[in-house]
Image (cartoon, grey):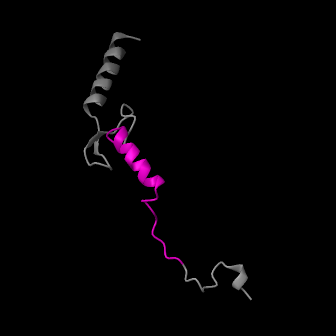
Amino acid sequence: MSDTKKKAAADAATTADSAQRWVKCPQCGGPSLYSPANRFRPFCGERCKQIDLGAWASEEFRMPTEAPPEDAEFGDPRLLP
């Protein structure tokens, strides 16, 4: 690789490092580096990642749905004529 190409690659890496993307941690709201260098992204650290995983495991995050009434014939083959 020529010296010019090496310098261009080094300049590109420096530019990429200086343009790091910081986002808000979804758990604590603190700053979190959003790049491959942060193995916990989008979280700021392992603790926030584990708290979020625990919330999913205990079903704290659910999709709201409306259950059909118990006497509705929707989906129950025993109630169909």
> Would you identify the image quadrant in which residue 20 lies?
top left
> Would residue 79 be found to the left or right of residue 53 on screen?
right
Front residue of 26/35: it is 26
Label total for image:
0
Residue furthest bottom in the image: 81
Indicate whether 18 appears above or below 63.
Answer: above
x%, y% of residue 41? Answer: 37, 40
Indicate whether 33 appears above or below 52.
Answer: above
Is residue 25 inside the magenta stretch? no
**Range of magenta residues:** 43-67
Residue drawn at point x = 34 percent, y = 10 percent: 3
Quadrant that contains the N terminus = top left
Front residue of 33/40: it is 40
Residue drawn at point x = 42 percent, y = 59 percent: 60
x%, y% of residue 68? Answer: 55, 80
Quadrant that contains the C terminus = bottom right
Is residue 64 inside the magenta stretch? yes
Residue drawn at point x = 25 percent, y = 30 percent: 18
Residue furthest front in the image: 58
Indicate whether 43 appears above or below 11.
Answer: below
Residue drawn at point x = 46 percent, y = 59 percent: 59
x%, y% of residue 77? Answer: 71, 80
> Would you identify the image quadrant in which residue 9 lies?
top left
Residue furthest right in the image: 81
